[in-house]
Each structure stands twice: as structure tokens, then as C-alpha cells.
Image (cartoon, grey):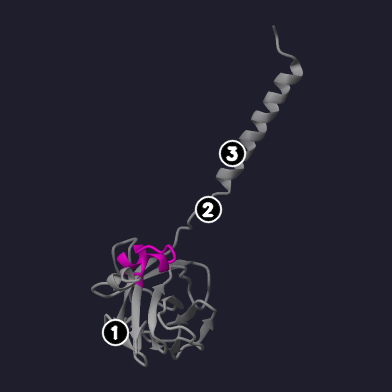
Amino acid sequence: MEKPKHTRAYRYLVLAVFSLFAMSWQCGEYAEPDYTHIIREKVDLYPYKKAYAVGDTIWIDTNITDRFLYDEKISQRVEIDSVALPLKLSFNKLYKRYQGETGPFFEAIYADPVQKHPEYLFFTYACNQPDYDFRVGIVLLKPGIYSLVLHDQNYFSNCITEGAYSRIYYTFNVADSNKDVFLSIPAISRGGLNTDRMDSKEEFIVQVVE
């Protein structure tokens, strides 16, 4: 028995709507742009310790004394001139044994302008410098265990005429990221966090004692 024409028309309509939806979803997928450069650099962290004291300062230093950066697109260092480089840091409390304390738990020391947000510090450096050396200090004010993270939302372009965008990734130049200190936190107090960023050296665990 032949099915009514309106039933077949309805099926064709559903199929057409589904096809349009699938096409729009594919077109709406995010496509990573073709960056001019994809830079990967290590930043020094010193002094390296398993446990710091209240009042100690941790220094984060790019230690790039020229204008050559490592471009992973061509697997070599290249001279890149007249760019404003970003550096985004966060320093967050993971675990604190001491209750009832108030006030900030760190203070940042820096010479360049910085955008301050509740959870991170965002620096832009290098545009007017003869090299790409940049340093920021983190003064430790309260006991506890903290997470120091180098974030990867680091897009940059020429600081004179914008247009050709590039991206830079940072990792800490350390032997290990104090993952053992993180694992010493009771599992119930880790907030579901994992160690992926510690393994990739994008996160360093800071233990501060009195």
C-alpha cells in the first residue's frame, strides 16, 4: 500500500532540515588560524625549592637576551622584531592548613604595566625593549600550598602595525614541578584537579611554610 504523499513530504522536510543543521554545525566549527609564528619558550623559575618561607620571593624570568625565539613551525630559532609579547600568570591557593587568616597571600613585583584580574596577572612586554628579557617576582605572604600557572592564551602581533598574528607558549625550566607536594594534599581536598599541567611544566606547585 502506497504511503500518503504528505507523509513522504514530511520525511523529505525532516531530512532537509537535518542536512542543513549538519552543514551549519560543520561551518561553525572553530578553525585554528594559520599563525605566522608558533613560539615555544622556557622561562626560568628561581630559587627552586620544595618548601619556601613566608617572605620569600619567586622570580619568573624569560631570560631571552636577544630577539630570537624558537618557532616550532620551522623547528629553529628565528629573529622576530617589533612584537609585543604576552605573559599570563595565575597564583591560586590549593590547600591551606591555617584557618582564620585574611588578606592577600602574594604580592607581585614587576616593572611593566599589568592587567590585574581576580585570578591572574596579564603582562605585555618587549615592544620597546632591545631584547625579550622579562622578569616578575611573586612575594609569598601566607603559609599554604599554591598553584603557579603559565597560561596558554597568548596571542600576539606586531606592536606597530597589527595584522599577522602569532602565538607563544611557555613552560617552566625546572627539573620537576613539585608534583609530589601536590600529591601530599589529601585527595578529598584537591578539588578534582589532575597533574597534566605539572607534567607538561606549565604549572609549578609552591609550598609555603612559616
Answer whether residue 197 is magenta in the image: yes
Answer whether residue 110 is magenta in the image: no
Write the residue at 36% across / 90% down: 54
Write the residue at 29% across / 84% down: 46
208 up-or-down from 25: above or below: below
Q: Nearer the viewer, residue 11 or 27?
A: 11
Question: How far is the residue under mark 2 from the one under mark 1?
Answer: 38 Å
Write the residue at 33% across / 68% down: 198
| 10 Å crowding of disc 2: few (<14), some (14-19), many (20+) | few
Secondary element type, mark 2: loop
Residue 41 in picture, x, y percent from top left: 33, 72
What residue type is disc 2 on? Tyr
Q: Which residue is mark 2?
A: 30
Q: Nearer the viewer, residue 89 or 57?
A: 57
Based on the displayed image, in which of its 4 quarters is residue 167 positioned? bottom left
- Residues in magenta, as a range: 186-203
Q: Which numbered disc, 2 or 1, marks the residue that appears first in the sequence? A: 2
Question: How far is the residue under mark 3 from the one under mark 2?
Answer: 15 Å
Whether residue 90 appears in this view of the structure is no
Q: Which numbered disc, 1 or 3, marks the residue that appears first in the sequence? A: 3
Q: Which residue is mark 3?
A: 22
Q: Nearer the viewer, residue 88 or 138?
A: 138
Residue 48 in picture, x, y percent from top left: 27, 82
Write the residue at 34% across / 74% down: 204
Q: Which residue is mark 1?
A: 46
